[in-house]
Image (cartoon, rainbow, N blue to C red):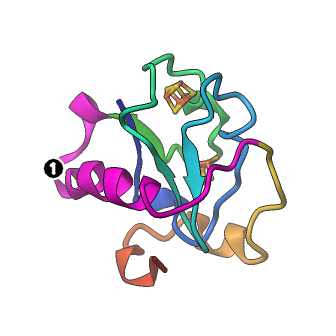
Amino acid sequence: TFVVTEACIRCKYTDCVSVCPVDCFHEGPNFLAIDPQACIDCAVCVPECPVNAIVADHELAPEQQHFLQLNATLAGQWPVINAAREPLPDAEQWAGVTSKLDHLVQ
Ligand code: SF4
Ligand code: F3S
């Protein structure tokens, strides 16, 4: 499966969702999660993300490993999003911030 990682938090550009052939993105207030049971590993979403937040599970950096379980959990709680929308208003400001997990709203 592919995994949405920390870079998405407080940005939520949503370019990724419009290309997913199986609608496996789920939307929370300031982050998206991929349903690992729905993802078919096509990788087409990866280059769509302006902040490179989407990573294959086997390529996760050590400090991003916990996002695998987090995506599965949050995807189960949040509704599907399959059409792009405006990024969060201060997305550009948060795009370069590397440590954002404390800001994740569930
Ligand atoms: Fe969807 Fe493909 Fe990205 Fe998985 S890898 S989330 S199936 S676009
Ligand atoms: Fe997040 Fe990137 Fe998609 S910021 S919403 S993973 S395009």
Does residue 52 appear left or right of residue 20 in this picture?
A: left
Does residue 75 appear left or right of residue 94 in this picture?
A: left
Q: Nearer the viewer, residue 104 or 49?
A: 104
- Tell me the quarter of the image containing the N terminus: top left
Q: Secondary structure at mark 1?
A: helix
Residue under circle 1?
Answer: 62
Residue 71 sits inside the magenta stretch = yes
| Total residue callouts | 1
Q: Quadrant of residue 99?
A: bottom left
Q: Which stretch did the figure color magenta?
A: 57-82
Image: 50 above or below 88: above
Q: For mark 1, does the 10 Å Cα neighbourhood hold few (<14), some (14 to 19), or many (20 or more) residues?
A: few
- The answer to whether the beta carbon of the residue marked 1 is less than 8 Å from any atom of ligand 2 is no
Identity of the residue drawn at 60% across and 26% down: 22
Q: Nearer the viewer, residue 103 or 40?
A: 40
Residue 81 sits inside the magenta stretch = yes
Image: 9 above or below 70: below
